[in-house]
Amino acid sequence: MDGNGRWATARHLPRVAGHSRGVDAVRTAVEQAGRHGIEYLTLFAFSSENWKRPQDEVSTLMRLFVSALQKEVGRLDKQGVRLRVVGELGAFDRQLQALIRDAERATASNSKLHLTICASYGGRWDIVASVRSLLASADDPRALAATLSEGQLAEHLALGFAPDPDLLIRTGGEQRVSNFLLWQCAYSELYFTHTLWPDFDAAAFDAALAWYATRERRFGLVNGQLPLAAEAARA
C-alpha cells in the first residue's frame, strides 16, 4: 500500500494526512474483497525497514494503528471478517500488542474474509523465523535436515494458515516486492499501478481484478497441460 506520503505532499498536506486517508482506502479494499467473494486479503501496513523512518512519522503510524484497531474491529466483526496481524509484534508497545490480541480474539470465529495485516514484517525475517520454529519443534534437527520439505517449512511461516497469494497488487508506481511475502509470492501475478494508495478506490480494485482475469496460471506447465491439471485438482 504505497504512496500515502506522496499523496499528501502533492496536496501540500503533512504526511500524516496521507496515512489517515490511507486508512479509508483499507476500508474500501476490505469491502471490495467481500463483495467479490475473496476469502483471503493480506495488507502490507508496516515493514521491518519502516522503523528507520523519521521518529515522528513512525509515532504517527503507531497512533493510527491503535486508532484503526479501536474503531474498525466492531465493523470487521459485523462483516464476518477474521483479523490477524503478523510480524515481529514484540517491537510494538504493550498497548498496541494488547489491542492486536483483543482484535484477533474478537474476530476469531469469523470466516467470510480472512484479513491479515503484515506489520513490522519482512519476507526474509519470515523465512528465518520459520526455520527457527521448525528446528525448535523437531526432536532430531539433523534427521529433519535430511527430509525437510517445502510444505513443512511453509507451515511455520507467518501466514502458514493461508494459501499463497494469487495476485499481488502494488500501488504508487514502484515495481518491486520490497521484501513482502518472498516465499509465498513465488507464483503470484504481479500488478503494478501508478495509483497512489489513498486513491486506490473500488474502481481501481476492480481494474486489478479484471487484469488478473486475463492471466493464465500455468505453474510451470505448458498450455496443453492446463485442462488435465484442472481435472486432477478437482478429483
Image (tube, grey):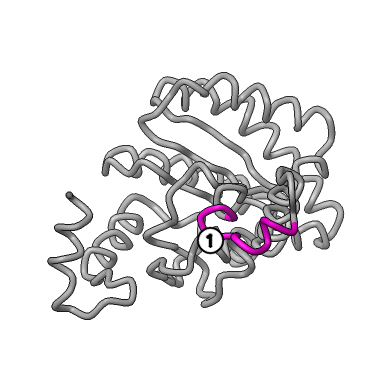
Residue 150 point in image, percent of width and height = 53, 61
Q: Is residue 58 left or right of residue 211?
A: right
Q: Is residue 54 left or right of residue 7?
A: right
Say which residue appears at 47% left-offset and 45% top-offset. Answer: 162
Q: Residues within 10 Å of mark 1 (few under 14, many from 20)?
A: few
Q: Which residue is mark 1?
A: 150
Locate the N terminus and report the quarter of the image it occupies. Answer: bottom right
Look at the image and give the residue range highlighted in magenta: 142-153
Residue 125 point in image, percent of width and height = 72, 59
Q: Is residue 85 left or right of residue 27?
A: right
Say which residue appears at 51% left-offset and 60% top-offset. Answer: 184
Instruction: State which quadrant residue 102 falls in.
Output: top right
Majority secondary structure in the magenta region: helix
Residue, far right: 55
Task: Give the camera-side residue of 16 and 163.
Answer: 163
- Residue 144 magenta-drawn? yes
Task: Give the camera-side residue of 92 and 21.
Answer: 92
Residue 164 point in image, percent of width and height = 44, 55
Instruction: State which quadrant residue 212 falls in.
Output: bottom left
